[in-house]
Amino acid sequence: MLRFFLKRLTTIIPTVILASMIIFALQQLLPGDPAIAISGEEKDPEVIAFIREKYHLNDPLPVRYAYWIGGVLQGDMGESIRLQQPVAQLIVSKFPVTLQLAVMAMAIALLIGVPLGVLSAVYNGKAMDYAANILALWGLSTPNFWLGIMLILLFSVQLGWLPASGYVPPTENLWENLRAMILPAFVLGNSIAAVMMRHTRAAMLQVLSSDYVRTARAKGLSPRAVIIRHCLRNASVPVITLGALEFGALLSGALLTEQVFSIPGFGKLMVDAVFNRDYAVVQGVVLCTATTYILLNLLADLAYFLVNPKLRRS
Amino acid sequence: MSVLSTPAPAPSAAARERSPFEEALRRLVRRRGAMIGLAVVVFFIAIAVFAPYVAPYDPTATSWLAVRKPPTWEHPFGTDEVGRDVLSRVIYGARASLSAGLVSVALAVAIGLPLGMIAGYAGGFIEAALMRLTDAMLAIPFLILAIALAAFLGPTLTNAMIAIGLSATTIFIRLTRAQVQSVKVEEYVEAARAAGATPLRIVLRHILPNILPAILVQATLTIAAAIIAEASLSFLGLGQQPPDPSWGSMLNTAKNFLSQAPWMAIWPGLSIFLAVLSFNLLGDGLRDALDPRHRN
């Protein structure tokens, strides 16, 4: 286990370093002088000189990267120009909101995707299979933000059941928090449910054709017992590990969903930063997303290693 | 004895003459979903190309007498907040969405295919370096990378296409490398090598034609993702800029008028959904036709 972990760590560390280099290099895409871009409308030479000094813009690129990554490693990702707050502090304050949204979306995706995938595999080639596949295609082809707008139109504007936007912290009022988060979570979970359905279907089809399932059936076990006790348990292994990787898609989707529903999370922080040319915040959010994604990959690998006896023995 | 001496049934002349391409085409034509997808894709491409002839009005022409009018015979999709015809804007919007889908994927293939072939064929340090770089880029979720790139490049449709193309490049590097690695050990490649063919000739003449089907399938599916990505960037204000129409930017405006003019949100969103669904159906059909093992 430790050897496996260390081996994976040796591949992950260069990936994180390279990802940080790419994110840092994004700043070089800014047309013209970044100091002038940051300095605002007045373009005061003294302000420009101060920015150059502060952000080490007179130094060569590798030196600037070393300063930046050195700061990041000490928890200093720079300061938001717009909000005048440390980027790390902003990210820490917004992360729980996005995390709640992502966890609720994943729960909805699992609740819809896994049963549909199971039914689709069990009734392979029948009407149920076609219906489940159509639902999956719907989920994969519907843009999150459009679905969000349509659901606001139905549940908020027409029926008036749920709030159209806004956020209430769960510590303040849990019921209002859930009312505000259920629509965005459903919107975000919709496309992931389609992916989960496809993963579950593929895994179930493989398990259903295996020898031990045939044996279990031959022993006279009821179809329900065979599916729940033998098939689903084994099929859930790849589904869970692949599900962990879908968190990357969740973070991307959260960006748009938070924008549609005005939820003050990670995604909204990045979009607001983009429009206010708050590049330190953009870099910080992208770096955190990439690191989270890489760590989730590692966790998925470890989970797969733990639940797969063949891998453990090798 | 009689069994042994019975000649095997001769394949029909048609089956004997059919090339792998014709076989794949036959399988594709038989798939109803793929054909519906293809028809809708062709329809969207046609309205994008012939937009000036098909659109009933100028998509940027405003009319203060027709602000937020619900659908009528005069304006079948209604009008927007400054009196522009929504149908005309949806038709012209197809240009932005489809060109973004096609151009960005063409860019991703143009960069990803050669790099993937180099990584897959050369191996060693070049492969390791390219793959580490690809892993690092893949660690940044597709849309987040595209938004970050578009933010730094500046908000225009061209920059959105570049951002989406660069973000999708990694998909093609990885796919091409994996395909090349599986094809380069085939006997016909070994034979070409033994006959003294240069690496460039082997890659272009013997490996490339065999990996193209997989690239084509992935490209079709990536166009669907690129259309959503362009719509997302335009929705956020990082793609097509007003007054030029794009489905994403139309939705961005529409969300502010949901209670007064819901039709402003319905049609552009439905167009994105239909375009993406069609490319997904076509991509799934192509995959099944080119690699029948995928069918189940």
Image (cartoon, coloured by chain):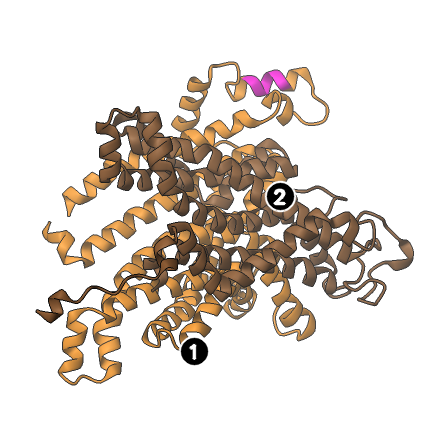
Chain colours: A orange, B brown
Is residue A269 left or right of A222 when viewed as pictured?
right
Residue at the right extreme, as displayed: B65
Q: Nearer the viewer, residue B51 or B141?
A: B51
Q: Residues within 10 Å of mark 1 (few under 14, many from 20)?
A: few
Disc 1 from disc 2: Cα separation? 37 Å
Kindly tell me whether residue A96 is visible in this rendering: no
Classify mark 1: helix, strand or loop: helix
Q: Residues within 10 Å of mark 2 (few under 14, many from 20)?
A: many
Q: Nearer the viewer, residue B216 or A205?
A: B216
Magenta stretch containing residue B103, yes or no?
Answer: no
Marks 1/2 in contact by CB < 8 Å: the verdict is no
> Mark 1 — on which chain does it sit?
A
Kindly tell me whether residue B160 is visible in this rendering: yes
Classify mark 2: helix, strand or loop: helix
Is residue B132 left or right of B283 when viewed as pictured?
left
Q: Amino acid at mark 1?
A: Ala
The verdict on a common chain for dots 1 and 2 is no
Q: Which mark is residue B99?
A: 2
Q: Is residue B21 above or below residue A88?
A: below
Q: Which residues are magenta?
A: A48-52
> Mark 2 — on which chain does it sit?
B
Q: Quadrant of the N terminus of chain B?
A: bottom left
Residue at the left extreme, as displayed: B1
Q: Which mark is residue A127?
A: 1
Q: Is residue B81 above or below residue A34?
A: below
Q: Nearer the viewer, residue A219 or A237?
A: A219
**Residue at the spot 61% in from the left edge and 59% down from the top edge:** A146
Q: Amino acid at mark 2?
A: Ser
Quarter occupied by residue A230:
bottom left
Give how far across and how far down residue B55 sits, in percent: 78, 53
Please, what is the dominant secondary structure of the magenta stretch? Answer: helix
